[in-house]
Image (cartoon, coloured by chain):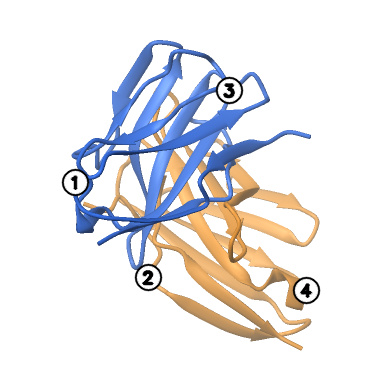
Chain colours: A orange, B blue
Amino acid sequence: DQQVKQNSPSLSVQEGRISILNCDYTNSMFDYFLWYKKYPAEGPTFLISISSIKDKNEDGRFTVFLNKSAKHLSLHIVPSQPGDSAVYFCAASGYNNNDMRFGAGTRLTVKP
Amino acid sequence: EAQVTQNPRYLITVTGKKLTVTCSQNMNHEYMSWYRQDPGLGLRQIYYSMNVEVTDKGDVPEGYKVSRKEKRNFPLILESPSPNQTSLYFCASSWQGNQPQHFGDGTRLSIL
């Protein structure tokens, strides 16, 4: 039972435009959400996170939005750059949990 | 430099031949974890450890063993590997399980 779902396996955008990656979760006990980026032949690297007490968190070109009522979060990348081309994983955990659940990932391609 | 180091990076072996994948971190993290990545399924947790001599099962522990005798090391053991354990494996560490994790670069196992 996948508790974290990324329904778009891939996304292609033009350089300079906005990339929007989506993630849905089913477990209402999740209260901390993260995005990781993964390049080929490397491990995932942490990108940005958001706690359930917020609905938005920004870090430079990256913004994560959380809609708790819809159990949905999204990652916005503005403007997109070719170096952003990677697989993006959404992850979630609960405050008292010792495990983290990951989505299946979305492959982002940013075309020059 | 903060690192999680996995060895080997690649291994091709045969069914039933015991193997160990080592994982070491230099950040003095208390929490360590093993994941496997499979197409369409994302990262699934195999085992995790909250501290020395404390380990617990993740989502897909069958066929795997772990040990945590020292804080820095968390080896993954496949006592009798089978072809369905062919996968890309990642080790990760963090201060706590619900915090951003540092990942190794992965170990690609092929069980024939």
Select label 3 or label 1 by which is in front.
1
Q: Quadrant of residue A108?
A: bottom right
Give the class, few, some or many, for how many residues have Cα within 10 Å of label 4's Cα (few <14, many ≥20): some
Rendered residue at 75%/84% (across/down):
A15
Question: Which chain is home to disc 3?
Answer: B
Calculate the distance from the C-alpha at mark 2 to the C-alpha at mark 1: 36 Å
- Amino acid residing under circle 3: Trp
- Amino acid residing under circle 2: Asn
Select label 2 or label 1 by which is in front.
1
Q: Secondary structure at mark 4?
A: loop
- Amino acid residing under circle 1: Gly
Q: Are marks 2 and 1 on the same chain?
A: no
The residue identified by callout 4 is A79
Calculate the distance from the C-alpha at mark 2 to the C-alpha at mark 3: 30 Å
Quarter that holds the C terminus of chain A = bottom right
The residue identified by callout 1 is B16
Q: Secondary structure at mark 1?
A: loop
Residue A80 appears in view: no
Rendered residue at 55%/46% (across/down):
A34
Tell me the tag on residue B95.
3
Calculate the distance from the C-alpha at mark 3 to the C-alpha at mark 4: 32 Å
Is there CB contact under 8 Å for labels 2 and 1? no
The residue identified by callout 2 is A7
Calculate the distance from the C-alpha at mark 4 to the C-alpha at mark 1: 50 Å
Question: Which chain is home to disc 4?
Answer: A
Is there CB contact under 8 Å for labels 3 and 4? no
| Coordinates of residue B57 in the picture (x, y in percent) | 27, 29
Q: Is residue B103 above or below residue A22?
A: above
